[in-house]
Amino acid sequence: MTRPAHTASNILGRLAAAYQGCEISDVQVRTGQLIAVHTNRGLELAQSFGVQDAAAVRMIAEGLYEQQSAELWEDQDGTAAADRMWNTLREKRVIDLSCAEGVLGAPVRMRVQIHLSDNGLGLTTRWLRGTITQLENLGLDPMITDSVHELMQRRFGLGLVTGSTGSGKSTTLAAILDWVRQNMAKHIVTIEDPIEYRYPDTMADPNQPGVLLPAPSIVTQQEVGRHTHSYQSGLKEVLRKTPNIILIGEIRDRHTMETCIEAAQTGHFVLSTLHTRGAIKTIDRIMEFFPKEQQPAILARLSETLTFVLSQGLLTGFNGRVLVTEYLQNTSDAVAAGIRAYDGAATSLEDALRVKGNLRWNNSLKDLYRAGMVPEEVFNANLLS
């Protein structure tokens, strides 16, 4: 009988070969449906692979779960990985995991969700780059890259990378942390759900090609549900690990948001994400976490701790995906005052975005359109009001 892991590698490897050069970002597998592949051309149906029956989807899901178990060297008293998967799925109805799967002769790190729907078993795999892309090569404005490099050298602060699902937030955060890892002596602790990119202990010697040196930073990575109970508990526990920089994979509730602000106020640099588009919507979302009577105090604390908001989106252009951004750096009295004065109307933050060194979303989008990189319908659909 074919082992599940081999089946998963086989079909994902065939997909990688079929879409080579198209930058696969996600693969959707559903019982009784064609496989859907997200590429730099948009969403495509892999018709040549045929409709996936229940047995095929089960084998892929079990294979990916088994691969994660093998990576973690789990001691589960002899319980088969497939049995553990089904037991977890019956209890929680969904499983989030990450693993490295072999495609095109090399391991590709994947973030996987195994879930249930009307069709039955299904899964979504997010394909992460095998290596971490340098911040300078992500398509960001050089002004933003230089600013982030400078701001990450501060002793404390709160940096937010925001955007919708699939906008490249994880890739940008990994690039930021990898730059810190190689250029500063820091203790970096990440709390993720699940762990995505891995950070090696070594770095390339800039003076001797092919030679590796120990990186000056150390990185401790924890996964929610495996190494800590929740983002909130992990963030509270992390303060005893003497970190300099803390990455929280996502801010999901008021308690996590408040703890992030407290950590920044007590001498840590905190990085995290929100599912918002634009700096103004980000502040709006933060305010939604708190009762109205607490919002002025939270805005005052944010004016002191919020260091930058980098909001981004990946759009389908004429020649692949392109990056649109909005950037707000809190490095002037005018921006801090704009944050303190925000009352739900856009005026104070719109004025702050006009301060030198910041970049407005619509201006970034207009630059892409004028350069002939995105069609008119994409331009119009992504303008922020």
Image (cartoon, rainbow, N blue to C red):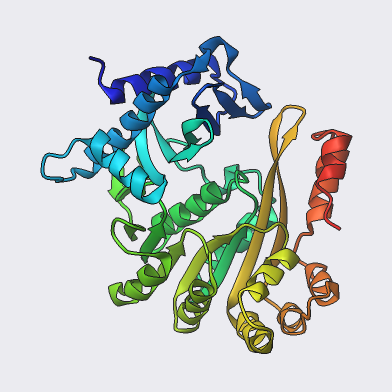
In the image, taking residue 126 as reference, residue 285 lies left or right, namely right
Whether residue 145 is situated above or below residue 196 in the rendered picture: below
Work out which quarter of the rendered image holds the C terminus and state it: bottom right
* Viewer-closest of 211 and 11: 11
Q: Residue furthest top?
A: 48
In the image, taking residue 46 as reference, residue 293 lies left or right, namely right
In the image, taking residue 126 as reference, residue 191 lies left or right, namely left
Image coords of residue 323 (percent x, y) = 69, 43
User: What residue appears at the point 62 percent right and 79 percent down from the top-left corner?
Assistant: 290
Whether residue 12 is situated above or below residue 96 in the rendered picture: above
User: What residue appears at the point 19 percent right and 35 percent down from the top-left corner?
Assistant: 80
Q: Is residue 217 visible?
A: yes
Work out which quarter of the rendered image holds the N terminus and state it: top left
Image coords of residue 301 (percent x, y) = 60, 85
Image coords of residue 19 (percent x, y) = 55, 19
Query: Would you identify the image quadrant in which residue 90 lies?
Result: top left
